[in-house]
Amino acid sequence: MKAVGFIGSPRKGGNTETLVNEILAGAAEKGAQTSTYSLNDLNIKGCQSCFYCKGHPGCVLKDDMQKLYDEIMKADAVIIGSPIYMWQMSGQTKIFIDRLLPFLNPAYSLKKGRRKDLVLAFTQGQDDSGLFMPYYESTGEMLESVGFNIKGLIVAPGVNEKGEVKKQKDTLEKARNTGRDLFK
């Protein structure tokens, strides 16, 4: 059993990283091997819209995304965490998501292979946890079309300063329980 987390925040040790690590800690409690990747630390170029991936396996760009494709394929569960910037996921997360195109056939249907369980984790400065819910839901729907089964959504509202999520005991407990539930 394997779970891999992708952290889309540039802030080291920040709220998004804490939330993703809490989900992975729950998975580890159930025996899953876990690993994390900070997208900000990786060399991931934006999709070039060349559609190489529609006629060939993989992506024409040879950057750190090649390693992440392998990690996703080996994983049973994937956790994607991002802060909300300007009402959307961070740029680092968006570039990563755009590069998931090789998982689709030329007609945009899912390529053969087993679907991966996915937990989405978002941190936001706004106190209203439902404010961006339509965005979170549409992001989940898009990721389902790429081959993920959405198994959870964790939102930590009102976290502007580094470490504030640690004060949200209920959110952290939900995150850990979600990680445990991935490997019942």
Image (spheres, rainbow, N blue to C red):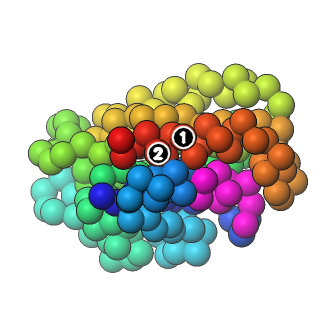
Secondary-structure class at tag 2: helix
Q: Quadrant of residue 88?
A: top right
User: Can residue 96 be seen here?
Assistant: no
Residue 25 picture quarter? bottom right
Image quarter of the N terminus: bottom left
User: In the rendered structure, are the residues bearing label 2 and label 1 in contact, judged by CB atoms less than 8 Å apart?
Assistant: yes
State yes or no: residue 45 in magenta. no
Highlighted magenta segment, given as a residue range: 13-22
Q: Quadrant of residue 143?
A: top left
Chief SS of the magenta region: helix
Image point (87%, 54%), residue name: 161
Name which residue lies at 26% across and 62% down.
74
* Whether residue 141 is situated above or below residue 120 in the rendered picture: above
| Residue 147 in picture, x, y percent from top left | 28, 41
Residue 37 in the image, given as x and y percentages of width and height = 51, 68
According to the picture, the residue beneath numbered tag 2 turns out to be 180
Label 1 sits on a secondary structure element that is: helix
Identified by mark 1, the residue type is Asn
Q: Residue at x 68, y 48 (%)?
A: 83
Q: Which residue is mark 1?
A: 177
